[in-house]
Image (cartoon, coloured by chain):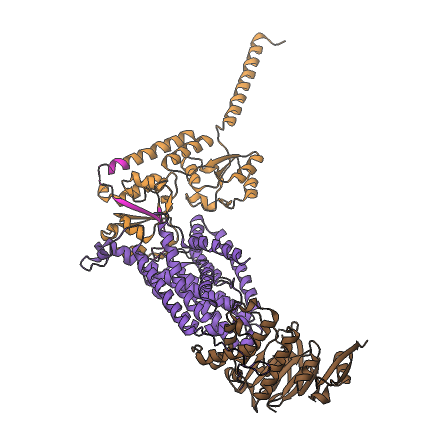
Chain colours: A purple, B orange, C brown
Amino acid sequence: MITVDSAGADGTPLPRRIPRSSIRGRLTATLLGFGMVALATCALAPLVGTTPISLTRALDPAIPFEQNVDAQIFFVARLPRVLAGALVGSALAAAGVVFQAMLRNPLATPFTLGVSAGASLGAMLVIVFGGALTFGSFSTVPAASLAGAAAATAVVYWLATRHGHAISTSVLLLAGVTLNSFLSAIIMFVQYLADFAQVYRAARWIMGDLDIGGYDTLIASLPLVIAAFALFAWLPSSLNLLSVDKDAAAARGVDVPRAQRLAFFSASLATSAAVSLAGPIGFVGIVVPHLVRLLVGVDHRIVLPASALFGAAFLVACDLVARTILSPVEIPVGIVTAMIGGPFFLWLLVRKS
Amino acid sequence: MASRTQKLIALVAVALAVFLLGTSLAQSREGGAGPGRIVSLVPAITEMLFAIGAGPQVVAVSSYDEFPAEVKALPKVGALLDPDTERILALRPDLVVVYGSQSDLQTQLERAHLRTFSYRHGGIATTLGTIRDIGVATGHRKESSDLVSSLQARLDAVRDRVKGRTRPRVVLVFERQAGTLREVYASGGVGFLHEMLDVAGGTNVFADVARESVQPSIETLLARAPDVILEVRASGLIEKTGADDADAWSALSSVPAVKNRRVHLLRGDYLVVPGPRLAMATEAFARALHPETFK
Amino acid sequence: MFLIADRVSYTYNRRTGVEAVKALRDISVGIDRGSFTGVIGPNGCGKTTLLKLLAGVHTPDSGSISLDGRPLPTMSKRYVARRIAVVPQETHPAFEYTVLEMALMGRHPHLGPFQLEGPADLAIAGEALAATGTSHLAERSYMSLSGGEKQRVIIASALTQSPEVLLLDEPTASLDLGYQLEVGLLLRRLNRERSATMVMATHDLNLAASLCDTLVLMRNGRVLASGNTADVLTSAMVRQLYDVEADVRVHELAGHLTVVPLGRLS
């Protein structure tokens, strides 16, 4: 075993500096900090809105629920919305981090590989051709978009692993981008066949909507997101090594094909769940990881959990703006995230050059 | 050499011939017999055409036309986004009914020396005015005038019926994601749905919104607390499912409409087409809002 | 023989068949423990591929690689990584890691799946940086360094793996003369004082002559010759390898063989 003493080439001792940075400390501090931000945002957001409500009245058990408008606004309108925002925001932000590391490209988003296009096509097909199909009290749009996302994921994976178990990231990227274009063309065609109302509904779905009005779809999506995050937990140090060099990672003990598969499927799962719940809300998956990296550095063991927490806070805040700024009209949340994301990227570009 | 009598008769005959020829020419210039072949891209106007007796003159309709039953047999030539200009021209129409926003199409048709009738979307007054205008354009002035009067009379009758009754606060929903309360679209304070609601004795909770449609959030629906929820759907797939998915509203139990079970689902495309059946639609609204006046 | 490649072949893009390149053709190489082996040959001869196979990064299409008598596939990748480290020719990270973060990545095979680096790991990294003269760069972004500095950081990150075998691919390629000497001395010290087994692929014949006791000469995916440096490094061999006429003799002052190219063979 090679151990190195701090002696120079000719044997004379070199000044030794044991680096002080303790990742354990930084990780704890970051998680605490971002965790508090996320918690505070999620706790305060249901209290704010176009209609003033009184928290004491909302939580008053003496008033029957059917007569307590404040409670209904809090529990039926706002709370599910905030929870959905937190779930979707953290899922998209984390998926963004994983895709960026896996594809070795800071400009990758959760939607780069066609998952959200598949989800959109699924939703669109139901909106145009499925009409009023329901399964009990569940609308089929979320289920169909989940199916579409799963199908797109499978197709991209199949294309990228045609020749061997290792995923070639360049082939993956190519397959994903191609599938994106192809699915977008089909979506346009489906919209062309639709009538006005359906086209409008489809366009509106694409802008994102967190107003789920109940806990059913949230509870349905929860296992998927939890599963994705459980898989995410295994990734960060592999992501560090993979994002430096694939072969170097293998030489350092990373099972590269397995890590790539894990990254691809977990991030696709998180994206699928998020998009089927609330539509393809853009920019969260790219703005949040970049912002977080500016604040905490690039070590994925910190960036991944921090992005999940910050993503939750970010989307909840964006939705808050979306539903209050032009009251009583609500802006789709995807527009707010885009309005923030666009200038942010311009600023990043300017800063870098 | 003709006698004076013969000359007189010839003169009268020529004068008569000229006169008859002249009037028949004048008539056709005026369109007195009306355009023989009409193509309509606007379903509302198709209905109007059939209602004023111009049905036999209609040779083609839009892809979305469904009423009256006669249109099912007619060729379809596209709609707002995809009018099939070639097909329209091939049908050699005398009058083409187009949307006001289809400026390219209008230019093309004018170049082919075809008459166009431009449709304007609007409230009740606009709709009635359009019936009158299309009557003039198609040589059915009297029928259209009669139709307008009868519709006006029916609307007035509804107004009288509900006069003096308390006007419930209504949200008029025309679209939402089936089975859920997501993507609810309701009528704003502008447009024929809003006006029909007004005639039928209801107050639109979104009367303050200066647009035809509003997409209210769950919070807004809870805050506005309507007394009645009136859902209108064009016929079609809804009928196939059979299930009345008004259950979705039960989540908003503090809303008076839900508490008092005043959630009504009305089906039929007559409800959403601003045409001759708007009086029928208004009566349907009134029946739902003030059932006691219809005993 | 400690690290053995036994009749290995490897073809890139074998499964796709598109642009398939047969990089190694049925070659056998044996590395003694504690030796310093140089792998020499013209561009495209398969040096880099050989190193990757020896490290277990790729699996040979035929034949096997074994470490200490055990075939690589029988051992976990992490275990192999704790014993063999690679210094690649080029590294282009996708994100702006600091020098310290790059160095600490070498600790990966020693840590459990959820384990974070502790003080011991930090100390090892610190020593590795010091040994390569890059301590002062610890908090700098790796991408902002000069070519030579980057190379030394990569060597440091291989050293933090605390391996018994170090595979180096052109380790002095971007270094100036001074740092070439320093790194060379460092490698020799590691080899002599710590019994580290070194395998170095290089174009620099004089460097190889000064450091290596054993040479493997490769051309077109085959081994042309292997053995003691003194026996193998001859002008006849240089002629065969590079089509270059060269004078090969022991330099009085340097104390080892030197190669002076005289002209290209037509």
In the picture, the quarter occupied by the N terminus of chain C is bottom right
Give the mark count: 0
Please provide percent x and percent y for residue B267: 34, 49
The image quadrant that residue A306 belongs to is bottom left
In the picture, the quarter occupied by the C terminus of chain C is bottom right
Please provide percent x and percent y for residue A194: 46, 51
Query: Relative to residue A162, is residue A300 drawn left or right?
Result: left
Report if residue A285 is visible in the image. yes
Looking at the picture, does residue B57 appear above or below residue C146? above
Q: Residue furthest front?
A: A12
Q: Residue at x 50, y 51 (%)?
A: A192
The image quadrant that residue A95 belongs to is bottom left
- Residue B21 among magenta residues: no
Please provide percent x and percent y for residue B269: 38, 46
Looking at the picture, does residue C177 appear above or below residue A56? below
Q: Residue furthest left?
A: A62
Region rendered in magenta: B158-186
Q: Residue furthest right?
A: C266
> Along the line of sight, which residue is nearer the eye, A43 or A262?
A43
Q: Residue at x 48, y 31 (%)?
A: B34
Report if residue A143 is visible in the image. no
